[in-house]
Amino acid sequence: MSKRFINNLKKIVKAIRGEGKVRKEFIRRAEEGGLTRDENPLTHFCVYFAAYDSESQQVFIGHHIKSGLWLFNGGHIDEGELPLEALEREVKEEWGEHIQLSGGLEPSLLTITKISNLTKQKCRSHYDIWYFVPLNEKSFTPDESLLAKEFYQTGWKTIEEAKQLIEDMNTLTALEKIQLRFN
């Protein structure tokens, strides 16, 4: 993996406030190399893009096919990509070409997800870089056929509705951070 990715990751880790243990583990893992799924199918870096609408105070989540969990959208960082480049590619792959992200998106959260779904996924650990994406629920029109490749169902949910569906602790942490943006 390129020094470009590692240097970018170090800037991200430095800029995000949060648990020191996770930040240190991100740097340790970055220095280990083999950061993408192609390079290391067991443990690698990913991006999440958590859509929210401040006006309606809702979030866009889905029932993910592989994990069986209710999650925000996301995906693996490919070899040669920086996290923001992976975000842009994944948005097109999951929401469609016509969705344009507003400029200035910055990572907002780092999490490490342990995966134990042996029957459906080779991955064992994801090093997740979270982007919170402000959208307007009424004008957001993702490509349903693309979403159907990854999710049984998707939709806008209030924070309380989402809390009833989400079991993954990292996704709940992201939800709490988004909720702070509503206040």
Image (cartoon, rainbow, N blue to C red):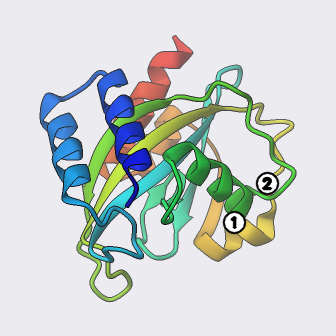
Cα gap from disc 2 to disc 1, whole angstroms: 8 Å
Q: Secondary structure at mark 1?
A: helix
Q: Is residue 142 above or below residue 120?
A: above
Q: Answer left or right for 121 relative to 101.
A: left
Q: Is residue 96 above or below residue 137?
A: below
Q: Answer left or right for 67 relative to 99.
A: left
Where is mark 2, residue-wise? 142
On-image quarter of the N terminus? bottom left
Q: Is residue 102 above or below residue 3?
A: above
Seen from the viewer's position, the closer of residues 162 and 182 is 182
Callout 2 amino acid: Pro
- In x, y percent, where is residue 163? 42, 42
Indicate the quadrant where residue 148 lies. Answer: bottom right
The mark tally for this picture is 2
Q: Residues within 10 Å of mark 1 (few under 14, many from 20)?
A: some
Where is mark 1, residue-wise? 147
Mark closest to the chain's N terminus, 2 or 1: 2
Residue sitting at 19 percent across and 58 percent down?
A: 32
Pointer 2 with pointer 1, Cβ within 8 A = yes
